[in-house]
Amino acid sequence: MLNFTADILPARVRFGWGMDEAIAEEAERLGLKRLIVLSTRGRANDACGVAEALRARAAGTFHGAEMHTPVKVTLAAVSDAEALGADGLVTFRGGSATGLGKAIALRTGLPQISVPTTYAGSEATPILGQTEGGRKSTLRDPKVLPKVIDYDVARTMTLPVELTVTSGLNAVAHAVEALYAKDANPISEMMASAGLKAMIPALRTLAKNPSHRDARADALFGAWMCGGVLGQVGMALHHKICHTLGGLFDLDHAKTHGVVLPHATAYNAAAAGDALAPLEALIGGPAGLALHDLGVELGAPTALRDLGMPESGISEAVDNAMLNPYWNPKPQERDAIQSLVRSAWEGSPPTSAVE
C-alpha cells in the first residue's frame, strides 16, 4: 500500500488553437470589468492587442515586467493598477510577466488570467521568486495562482527557436527535479514523466522546424505538465543554484536553467537512484551527460560564462547557494558544489567526479 500526500492545485485551463475570445470570456465569467494587461517592454505591441481583444474590459497596460521580478518594478505596477482601478490582471507572454502578475496578486489579491506563450510553466505554480538587493528569494502561496490559464497554441507559432529551446529546457528542469523530490508521489511522477515525454521530442522537432503545429502543441502541453508538477513538490539543489545565480548576476533565467541542469542532475544521479529512470529511458543515460548532449543538440547555451557570469563570482555563488539550502537527495558539500558550478561556468560536460 502506498502512503503519500499530494497537493492538487486548483486551476481552470483552456487549451487549444486560436482562442482570441477566451480571455474576454473568462473575464466575463469571473465578473472582471477593469483588467490591466502586463508584459515586458519587448512585447508591448502584442499586449496592446490583448487589451483590444478585451474591449471595454481593458483598463490599461503595464509594459515594465523584468526577469527575476524586481520588487521595485512590482511596486510601480501596483501603483499603476490602483490608479487605473483595476479589478484583475492579464499576464502575457513569459515568466517575467507571469512573475509580475504573481507579485501583484500577492500584495493586492487581484485575480489573474495568464496567457503564456513560452514554455517555462511558472503560470501553473504557486511559486513566486522576487529579487531585491542582489538576492532572489522564493515563496509558495496559493494567492499567487492564476484563476485561469489560457494555453493558445496559435500564439506560440512565432516564438523564436532560441527562446523555444531555452524556455523548453527550463520546463524540463522542473520535471527532472520533481522526479527525485522529497515529496514526490504517484501523481507528481506521472505529471513529470508526461511533461518530459511531450517536451523533449517536441524541442527536437522545433529546433529544426519551428512551424510544426503538432510539436508546438506538444511543447505547450509539456510546459503545463512540467510547471504543474513544480507546483506540487519541493525544489532541490538545481533550483537553488539557478535562483542564486539569477539574483547575484541577473543572468537569463531560462538559459541558466538549461546550463546548470546537466551538472545538478549528475551531482544527484547516484543518490536519486531509480527516480531518474523515466528520463534516462527517454534520452539515454547517464542522465547528466545525456542532458548536456541534448542542450548541445538543440543549440542551447552550455556555459555560464557565455551568459555573462564572471569567473570571480563562482565562490560567491557557491557561498550563497549553501545558505538556507533546499532539501536535496545528496548531501550538499561545498567543494563538490564548487566543482559543479565551475564545470557549468566552463561549459564542460558533467564529469564522473561530479556524478
Image (cartoon, helix red, strand yellow):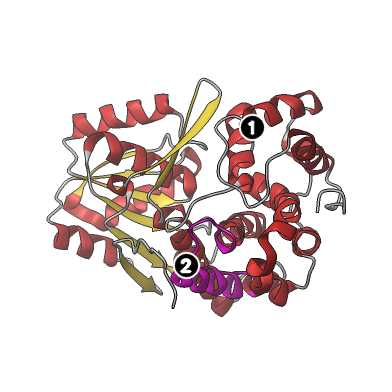
Instruction: Classify 202 as above or below 295.
Output: below
Q: Nearer the viewer, residue 145 or 46?
A: 145
Q: Main secondary structure of the magenta part?
A: helix
Q: Callout 1: few (<14), some (14-19), or many (20+) C-alpha neighbours within 10 Å? A: some
* Vertical order, 86 against 94 (above or below): above
Looking at the rendered image, the quarter that the N terminus falls into is: bottom left
Q: Amino acid at mark 1?
A: Met
Q: In the rendering, which numbered label is found on residue 218?
A: none
- Quarter of the image that includes the C terminus: bottom right
Q: Is residue 63 magenta?
A: no
Q: Is residue 182 magenta?
A: yes
Which residue is drawn at the image coordinates 36% and 49% (left, top)?
91
Whether residue 85 is visible to the viewer of this picture, yes or no, is yes
Q: Residues within 10 Å of mark 2 (few under 14, many from 20)?
A: many
Viewer-side residue, 89 vs 329: 329
Q: Residue at x 56, y 72 (%)?
A: 193
In-image side of 227 versus 150 (left or right): right
Q: Which residue is mark 1?
A: 322
Task: Classify 64 as above or below 231.
Answer: above
Q: Quadrant of residue 313?
A: top right
In the structure shown, which secondary structural element does the residue marked by tag 1 occupy? Answer: loop
Q: Secondary structure at mark 2?
A: loop
Left or right position of 41 against 12: right
Find the distance from the CA under tag 2 to the CA under tag 1: 27 Å
| Span highlighted in magenta in the image | 178-201
Give coordinates of residue 69: x percent, y percent. 46, 35
Q: Residue at x 19, y 40 (%)?
A: 86
Outermost residue toward the front?
1
Rendering quarter of residue 336: top right
Residue 185: mark in rendering: 2
Q: Amino acid at mark 2?
A: Asn
Q: Residue at x 42, y 58 (%)?
A: 232
